Image (tube, coloured by chain):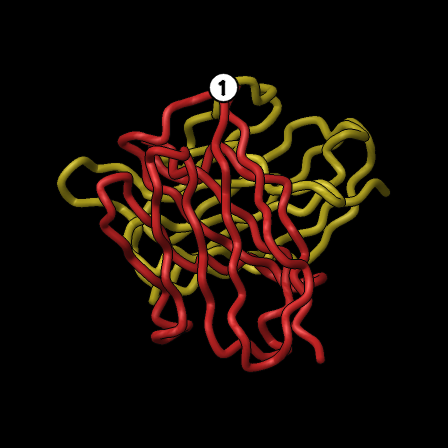
């Protein structure tokens, strides 16, 4: 199985400041045939299901604000919220879908400082 | 707008079978991978398995041989059966659609299933 590990487990950021979440996979999730990273990011607010934010590591899902961005390749990835808003308080997960079993990181809780 | 809704018993006794159904509305069930994902209270997300609309399945080996996922395209539904449950199977169970670009783009609201005698 590909193990996905996020850091930090939690972080507190002031409104308007940048939040950065890291995700590391135990094996590369870069597909050698299409050069795409098979990694997604989700946002889960309290009492709600996860919401897809990014796919192919850096492609924003339709309707996701452009303050959210994803980067990285291979085994190391980052989700950045450029200017944190109150509605961004949530737990964020990364997930690899290169090979089954598809696996998620343990989550990073983002709060307002 | 695609919507998914889980249904089934909220309380299951240890050693019995957990059974859930996911009903899809607002979109086609065809040509997608449909998954079950669970999340223990306060815990992490675990992918259980998927069924493709032609019936192909893929399960998480962590659940060994306890899982069966079936699809009924005539009813726009797919189902989960998890046998020999224990308290460790207590979780919120989500059904979700596999996005064509990867990841899961539509999710049900989730249903908390408690395993208890």
Between B57 and B14, the one lying in front of the other is: B14
> For the point 61% across and 80% down, which residue is it?
B14
> For the point 63% across and 63% down, which residue is it?
B91
Between A8 and A60, the one lying in front of the other is: A60
Q: Position of residue B38 (x, y in %)?
A: 55, 57
Q: Position of residue B10 (x, y in %)?
A: 68, 59
Name the colour assigned to chain B in the rendering: red
Q: Is residue A7 above or below residue A50?
A: below
Q: SS for tag 1?
A: loop
Q: Position of residue A105 (x, y in %)?
A: 52, 57
> For the point 77% across and 27% down, which residue is it?
A85
Output the letter for the chain in yellow. A
Q: Is residue A25 above or below residue B82?
A: above
Instruction: Provide the residue designation for mark 1.
Output: A62
Locate residue A31 relative to residue B68 in the image: left or right.
Answer: left
Q: Which chain is disc 1 placed on?
A: A
- Quarter of the image where the C terminus of chain A is located: top right
Q: Kindly give the residue lying farthest to the front in the view shown.
A: B74
Locate residue A14 relative to residue A58 in the image: left or right.
Answer: right
Q: Quadrant of residue A81?
A: top right
Between A103 and A12, the one lying in front of the other is: A103
Q: Kindly give the residue lying farthest to the left in the view shown.
A: A33
Q: Position of residue A53 (x, y in %)?
A: 53, 32
Between A60 and A48, the one lying in front of the other is: A48
Q: Quadrant of residue B74?
A: top left
> For the point 41% across and 33% down, which residue is it?
B76
- Label 1 environment density (alpha carbons within 10 Å; few <14, some 14–19, many ≥20): few
Q: Is residue B101 above or below residue B113?
A: above
Locate residue B65 relative to residue A50 in the image: left or right.
Answer: left
- Quarter of the image where the N terminus of chain A is located: bottom left
């Amino acid at each position: 199985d590909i193990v996905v590990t996020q850091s930090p487990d939690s972080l507190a950021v002031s409104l308007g400041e940048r939040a950065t979440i890291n995700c590391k996979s135990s094996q590369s999730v870069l597909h050698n045939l299409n050069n795409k990273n098979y990694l997604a990011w989700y946002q889960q607010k309290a009492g709600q299901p996860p919401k897809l934010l990014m796919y192919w590591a850096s492609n924003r899902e339709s309707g996701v604000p452009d303050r959210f961005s994803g980067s990285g390749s291979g085994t190391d990835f980052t989700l950045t919220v450029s200017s944190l808003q109150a509605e961004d308080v949530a737990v964020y997960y990364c997930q690899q879908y290169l090979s089954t079993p598809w696996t998620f990181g343990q989550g990073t809780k983002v709060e307002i400082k | 707008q695609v919507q998914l809704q889980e249904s089934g018993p909220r309380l299951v006794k240890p050693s019995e079978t957990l059974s859930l159904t996911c009903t899809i509305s607002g979109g086609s069930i065809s040509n997608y991978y449909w998954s079950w994902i669970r999340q223990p209270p306060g815990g992490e997300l675990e992918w259980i398995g998927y069924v493709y609309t032609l019936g192909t399945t893929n399960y998480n080996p962590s659940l060994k041989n306890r899982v069966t996922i079936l699809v009924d395209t005539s009813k726009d539904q797919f189902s989960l059966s998890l046998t020999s449950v224990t308290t460790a199977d207590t979780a919120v169970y989500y059904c979700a659609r596999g996005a064509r670009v990867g990841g899961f783009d539509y999710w049900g609201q989730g249903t908390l299933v408690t395993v208890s005698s």
